[in-house]
């Protein structure tokens, strides 16, 4: 066994890894150290390793949402292998054309952050089939980056970990309103305040979460009501809730990006179109929950209020929803509002890294903030919002942290501990004429480098030193314990900007059920939303823990509303049919025909489409050992109001694969006995499937099957290759009208007594 080591460059720094080679075989890929966000890294590296080992190659796909990190490992590993002159015995994955895959579900959730997960779990717990699609190759979105702190007002969890604290939904709502200066939409704040307790209890029970009293209880909350998970990380939330969701039957599609909405001819939302590697999903759903997060990473969407602010959230918060929802004319509000914090360094244009730990330490040690005029701007040791607002008022919305060497040393070690690389900082010092400014030298030198008047800066430092010596800061009333004179004659000046990660504006919803509304205020049928994509509950400035509280409570409400809506839909459609695709071909026009019927008649009937593809050939010797697919088909047929079979014609009869399935369904079991059946078919020619349909009637009529085939109707769709449009609907109006007539007859036929 040979061990090869390599170094890749991720988002936050170097990734050291080791490749274990057994001759020319990759045996293992292990990461020795990294500085990436653990929650994301841990999910991503496992997948990467799996495909590398399976394909015995580093020429595998990078993982969406973590492309920089995974591509860097792959590129670097390829180089290591090349340098060693190793010829890998690769087994490249077969390249697949962009296949169309169809899925149907009760509730579809867009987004795998906290809001999407809670809504998905709630709908699942209500008994619905739920699919969650997530564009990244990992779960968690922005959620995974936070500390899991949330309020627990009104929950059993609060009663257990906080005791009687005098909290109430009304008190929470009042705190939220006060903190955002009443800019919130009160109905949404109330929805959050009255549901967060039940939501926390629900998700704790669902996923076995063990919330505890949060270590930090912030003063924005008038009572101690904040709780957090033992790890103080939402990664724990994402991991446990995703695992519970899947274990209880929920389906997660990772690396699957919603690109369009399925909207029927009446303008009603019926599902989504989503892209994944090598395939496009067309997912039909009775209800859709939009939980796709914020849009801070989309520079084009940022409003005027964000000018001069840098973004430090996940680069995947790109506001896709505002593109794929365009046709729906959804109402949105306050898209220019951001949750702004101080303590940022602009590391790339518009992108910040936060320096909170380092900056706080520096001001604790006496450092001051000065503006471009060389003047102090604030009591540096006051609450962060004061510093934030003071920086926003400065020319260029920029301030500088002025430190002596002793303070810089502490500042530096905290930067390196939290996300900054030593080389990166060296580079900042080297590029003197470029932002971000990191400069050192005499007071005059640091001032002139960044364009501050040195004389004014000297006055500021002298005044401050005098205040520190006296122990009284008359200018800003800074606490005595934070007043320390500058030592030595070497100074460090570091640029500081405000930053944001969370967008506070978003779509508008109905405040009772989180249903999205149009610009004219009409609720959009079947469409709900939750989390950061919906604006308003926290107004213009969310208090600590309140975005998590919004994501979890709104997801809880949206999940229930989506579930109820799906049930209503099922109750409204009067007939439930099973559709059988009568061929095992991967590409089939008869499959298209059935899906076109599913869309065309969705208001009247539900057509649950089953495949014969992949079902083992009937074998009389094991007729009682039913394959799982046959058992599922049996149950579906027994519970249905009728069956629609779409058959092609092979050699004047039905395909062998369909015949085989009918043999399974008529040997040891007989679910088709007395069942009403409609036969349809499409073929490349003018009147293909005539003989196959006659043949099928004959088979369905035999004693073992004994189905009731609708008489007097034969639906045949000619010229199949040209019969469907891009949305897979039947193009020809005459054919649609004839199909409607036949289907109406079938609806009547299935309602008649046998
Ligand atoms: C660094 C950081 C720290 C924070 N700290 C706190 C805190 O301490 N307390 C607090 O209350 N809040 C905090 N927040 C805010 C809070 O994390 C978010 O507001 C909240 O997690 C949003 O949850 P969400 O489920 O709405 O969105 P997200 O968690 O962002 O999830 C949305 C998901 O939708 C997916 N998606 C987007 N488009 C598509 C598409 N087209 N198809 C499929 N999937 C798609 C995204 O990939 C993402 O995974 C913090 C945010 C950040 C970035």
Image (cartoon, rainbow, N blue to C red):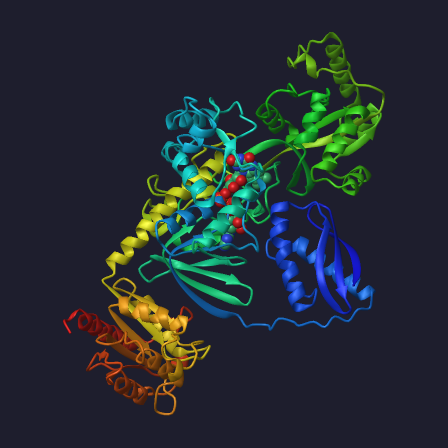
| Residue at 53% over, 25% down | 217
Q: Residue 442, image x and y in percent?
A: 84, 25
Task: Quadrant for residue 450, please give it.
Answer: top right
Q: Is residue 707 left or right of residue 18?
A: left
> In x, y percent, where is residue 233?
57, 39
- Above or below: residue 689 compared with residue 398: below
Quick check: can you spot residue 461?
A: yes
As drawn, which residue projects farthest toward the top?
470
Specify whether residue 501 is in view.
Answer: no
Image coordinates for residue 14, horizontal then vertical, percent: 74, 48
664 with respect to 116 (left or right)? left
Q: Outermost residue, left direction?
A: 753
The answer to which of 554 and 333 lies nearer the viewer is 554
Q: Quadrant of residue 73?
A: bottom right
Q: Pick whichever, 420 or 151, lies toward us.
A: 151
379 left or right, relative to 5:
left
Q: Can you say which quadrant of the picture contains the C terminus?
A: bottom left
In the rendered image, the residue lying farthest to the bottom is: 651
């Amino acid at each position: 066994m040979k061990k090869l080591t390599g170094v890749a460059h991720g988002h936050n720094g170097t990734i050291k890894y080791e490749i274990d080679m057994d001759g020319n075989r990759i045996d293992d890929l292990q990461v020795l150290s990294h500085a990436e966000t653990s929650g994301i890294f841990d999910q991503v590296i496992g997948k990467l390793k799996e495909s590398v080992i399976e394909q015995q190659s580093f020429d595998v796909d990078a993982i969406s949402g973590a492309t920089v990190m995974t591509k860097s490992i792959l590129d670097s590993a390829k180089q290591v292998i090349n340098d060693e002159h190793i010829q890998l015995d690769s087994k490249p994955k077969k390249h697949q054309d962009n296949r169309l895959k169809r899925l149907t579900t009760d509730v579809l959730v867009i987004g795998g952050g906290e809001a999407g997960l809670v809504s998905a779990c709630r709908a699942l717990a209500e008994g619905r089939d739920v699919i969650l699609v997530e564009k990244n190759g990992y779960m968690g979105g922005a959620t995974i980056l936070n500390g899991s702190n949330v309020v627990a007002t009104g929950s059993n969890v609060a009663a257990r970990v906080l005791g009687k604290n005098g909290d109430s939904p009304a008190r929470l709502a009042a705190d939220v309103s006060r903190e955002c200066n009443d800019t919130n939409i009160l109905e949404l704040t109330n929805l959050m305040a009255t549901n967060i307790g039940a939501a926390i209890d629900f998700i704790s029970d669902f996923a076995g979460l063990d919330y505890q009293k949060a270590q930090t209880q912030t003063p924005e909350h008038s009572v101690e009501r904040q709780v957090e998970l033992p790890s103080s990380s939402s990664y724990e939330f994402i991991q446990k809730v995703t695992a519970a969701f899947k274990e209880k039957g929920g389906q997660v599609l990772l690396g699957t990006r919603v690109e369009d909405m399925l909207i029927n001819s009446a303008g009603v939302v019926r599902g989504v179109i989503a892209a994944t590697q090598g395939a496009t999903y067309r997912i039909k759903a009775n209800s859709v929950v939009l939980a796709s997060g914020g849009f801070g990473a989309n520079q084009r969407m940022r409003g005027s209020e964000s000018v001069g602010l840098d973004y430090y959230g996940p680069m995947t918060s790109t506001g896709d929803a505002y593109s794929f929802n365009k046709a729906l004319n959804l109402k949105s509000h306050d898209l220019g509002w951001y949750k702004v914090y101080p303590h940022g360094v602009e590391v790339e244009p518009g992108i910040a890294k936060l320096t909170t730990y380092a900056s706080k330490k520096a001001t604790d040690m006496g450092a001051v903030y000065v503006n471009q005029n060389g003047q102090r701007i604030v009591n540096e040791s006051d609450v962060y919002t004061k510093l934030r607002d003071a920086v926003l008022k400065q020319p260029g919305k920029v301030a500088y942290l002025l430190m002596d060497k002793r303070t810089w040393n502490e500042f530096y070690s905290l930067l390196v501990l939290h996300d900054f690389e030593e080389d990166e900082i060296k580079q900042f010092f080297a590029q003197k004429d470029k932002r971000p400014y990191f400069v050192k030298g005499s007071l005059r030198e640091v001032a002139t480098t960044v364009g501050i008047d040195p004389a004014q800066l000297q006055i500021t430092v002298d005044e401050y030193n005098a205040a520190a010596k006296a122990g009284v800061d008359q200018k800003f009333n800074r606490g005595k314990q934070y007043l320390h004179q500058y030592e030595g004659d070497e100074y460090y000046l570091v640029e500081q900007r405000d930053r944001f990660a969370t967008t506070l504006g978003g779509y508008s919803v109905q405040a009772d059920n989180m249903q999205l509304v149009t610009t004219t205020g009409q609720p959009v049928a079947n469409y709900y939303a939750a989390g950061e994509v919906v604006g308003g509950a926290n107004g213009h400035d969310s208090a600590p823990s309140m975005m998590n509280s919004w994501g979890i409570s709104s997801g809880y409400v949206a999940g229930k509303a989506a579930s109820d809506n799906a049930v209503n839909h099922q109750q409204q459609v009067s007939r439930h049919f099973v559709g059988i695709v009568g061929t095992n071909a991967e590409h089939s026009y008869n499959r298209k025909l059935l899906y076109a019927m599913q869309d065309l008649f969705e208001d009247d009937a539900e057509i649950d489409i089953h495949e014969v593809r992949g079902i083992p050939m009937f074998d009389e010797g094991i007729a009682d050992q039913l394959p799982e697919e046959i058992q599922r088909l049996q149950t579906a047929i027994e519970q249905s109001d009728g069956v629609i079979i779409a058959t092609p014609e092979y050699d004047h009869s039905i395909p062998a694969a369909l015949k085989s399935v009918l043999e399974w369904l008529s040997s040891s079991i007989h679910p088709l006995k007395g069942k009403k059946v409609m036969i349809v078919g499409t073929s490349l020619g003018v009147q293909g499937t005539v003989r196959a349909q006659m043949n099928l009637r004959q088979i369905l009529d035999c004693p073992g099957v004994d189905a009731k085939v609708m008489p007097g109707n034969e639906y045949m769709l000619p010229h199949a290759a040209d019969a469907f449009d891009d949305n897979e609907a039947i193009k020809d109006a005459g054919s649609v009208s004839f199909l409607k007539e036949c289907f109406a007859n079938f609806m009547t036929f299935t309602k008649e007594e046998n």
